[in-house]
Amino acid sequence: MSNAAITTIITQLSTTATDGTVTNSFQDDVIFELSRGVYPDVLAQVGSAFIAVTAGTARYSLPTASGARTPLALFYDTKQLLLLRKDEAWAYDEAWRNAPHNQVVGYTFDPEDRPNFALVPPPRRDGATIGGNTPTVVTAWPDANITAVYANTDLTFPGTTYDDLKLPIALEVMAREFGRDSDHEDKMMTEVCHNLAEFFFLMFTPVGRPT
């Protein structure tokens, strides 16, 4: 799920046509890295939510309406789930991985469709009513549901907004787009965009760091 404003910046700055599908994936990569602290001088906010579970259903989605983008960690009840590659998931017995069970082992997702994921195996029972509970405001823990921690499109944190990060994110996406093997590969453009992205990222003073 690309950010329209970042895509517009990329279009305005690029001197040649770029591959929209690839640049959208690069956007997700950069957002994910921001959330994991790859850029040490930028503090990015992540989001969390409970996701209601239906017995026998394997596929679920992050709350994209709230800005959810890429899962950082998923939990079923109190157990953190393994992120499985497709071949790892298929290594389990087919009948077992497709049949509902009390315990969920892990999850898989497509890198080009990151907000959607599949549980392995599907849960056997419906989750408890979530109501107004959230992972940060819990009055009664909703058993047998998914707790998701994810990279957030919004990235809003006190003192700054996501708007401030759109330009460096766009530049870093462009650096990766022009650096890959394609008919518009341009190593000089890659280096320029990457250096500019780092420069603009470093202009921010993260929350909690002394000015």
Image: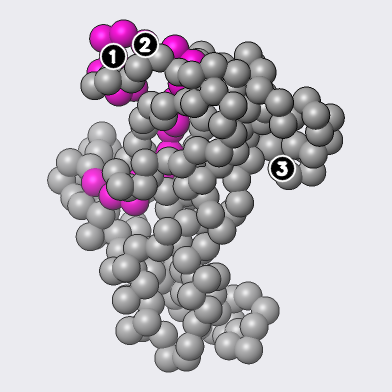
Q: Nearer the viewer, residue 39 or 27?
A: 27
Asked if disc 1 and disc 2 are in contact, CB closer than 8 Å, the reply is yes
Find residue 8 and name its label. none
Q: Nearer the viewer, residue 202 or 186?
A: 186
- Main secondary structure along the magenta-highlighted residues: loop
Mark 1 residue type:
Val
Where residue 97 appears, x then y in whole percent? 74, 29
Q: Which residue is mark 2?
A: 141
Where residue 118 appears, x then y in whole percent? 60, 38
Image point (71%, 26%), residue name: 99
Q: Between disc 3 and disc 1, whose residue precedes?
A: 3
Mark 3 residue type:
Arg
Q: Which residue is mark 1?
A: 138
Q: Between disc 3 and disc 2, whose residue precedes?
A: 3
Q: Is residue 15 left or right of residue 188?
A: left
| Secondary structure found at label 3 | loop
Q: Residues under labels 3 and 2: Cα distance?
A: 30 Å
Q: Which residue is mark 3?
A: 85
Image point (28%, 14%), residue name: 138
